[in-house]
Image (cartoon, rainbow, N blue to C red):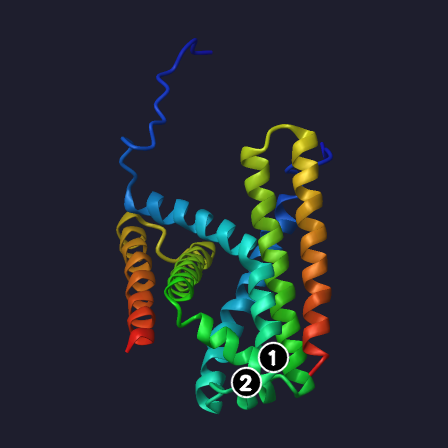
Amino acid sequence: MRRVGGAHRGIDMWLMQRASALYMALFLPIFMAAVMYCGAFGYAGWRAMFVPLPMKLATLLFVAALLVHGWIGMREIGIDYVQHLGVRLIYYFIFAMLYLACLAWTVAILWSI
Amino acid sequence: MPAKRPFFLNLLIIRLPVGGMVSILHRVTGAALSVAVPFLIYLLGRSLRSAEDFHAVADWFGTPLGWLILAGLTWITLHHFFAGLRHLGFDLGWGEDREPARLTAWLTLALGIGLTLLVAIGRLI
């Protein structure tokens, strides 16, 4: 039975955890290589990297994958260690607000340059 | 149903096998990264705002505290990354036997610590 705050959505979460991990595992090495290759060690080069739209989108997808991945992980830790339902829901609520704000913040950062 | 089982959870005395060590570190580093996300986004935003802000961030990573946090974040990220790759391998049925699982566990620890030392020492030179 599905219950509020419960653990019975495992397979969706399991799959999302792998999908987001895969995207990050591909993005991070390519991103590091691009920083090295472009020599983006100064401000001008670093900023120029994020100007093209595909880079903004790829970076935003990375942050979205990171937030989804982190959310599922923190949810799992909550299911293991936070047994009181009310406390667990407050814990979910705090992370949900924080992570949604982080996503919007990332959009603001990337589209301000 | 058995009435009473021995209950032994003294974390200072339990000897975890290397796979268990990598596993609990995967969780701890994941939790640390989850909490660090807003800080990382702040750094991204600050570094992109202006040349002065970019250099403020770069200089801060040159201070002892900044260097320590950079080294810590590097290890946390690398350990979580390699432990995660190991788990993706398990999902595909790779290295699930005892011997290869132990080997990849040691490899995860070694790569995480080794590459962190390279980065951390590289920043000092």
Tag 1: amino acid = Leu
Res. A19 in view:
no
Q: Are marks 1 and 2 on the same chain?
A: no
Q: Is residue A87 left or right of residue B100?
A: right
Q: Quadrant of the C terminus of chain B?
A: bottom left
Pick whichever, A31 or A107, lies toward us: A107
Q: Are marks 1 and 2 in contact (CB under 8 Å)?
A: yes
Compared with A22, A87 (above or below) is above
Where residue B115 sits, quadrant-wise, is bottom left
Per the rendering, the mark at residue A45 is none
Residue A76 pos. (x, y %): 57, 43
Residue pointed to by mark 2: A46
Compared with B17, A44 (above or below) is below
Q: Is residue B59 left or right of residue A57?
A: left
At 43% from the left edge and 51% from the top edge, which residue is drawn?
B26
Res. B53 in view:
yes
What kind of element bears circle 1?
A: helix
Residue A101 pos. (x, y %): 72, 59
- Check the image and name the residue furthest to the top: B3
> Around disc 1, counting alpha carbons within 10 Å, would you say few (fewer than 14), some (14 to 19), or many (20 or more)?
many
Tag 2: amino acid = Trp
At 26% from the left edge and 51% from the top edge, which residue is drawn?
B99
Residue B1 pos. (x, y %): 47, 11
> Around disc 2, counting alpha carbons within 10 Å, would you say few (fewer than 14), some (14 to 19), or many (20 or more)?
some
- How far apart marks 1 and 2 lie (CA) works out to 7 Å
Pick whichever, B99 or A108, lies toward us: A108
Residue pointed to by mark 1: B48
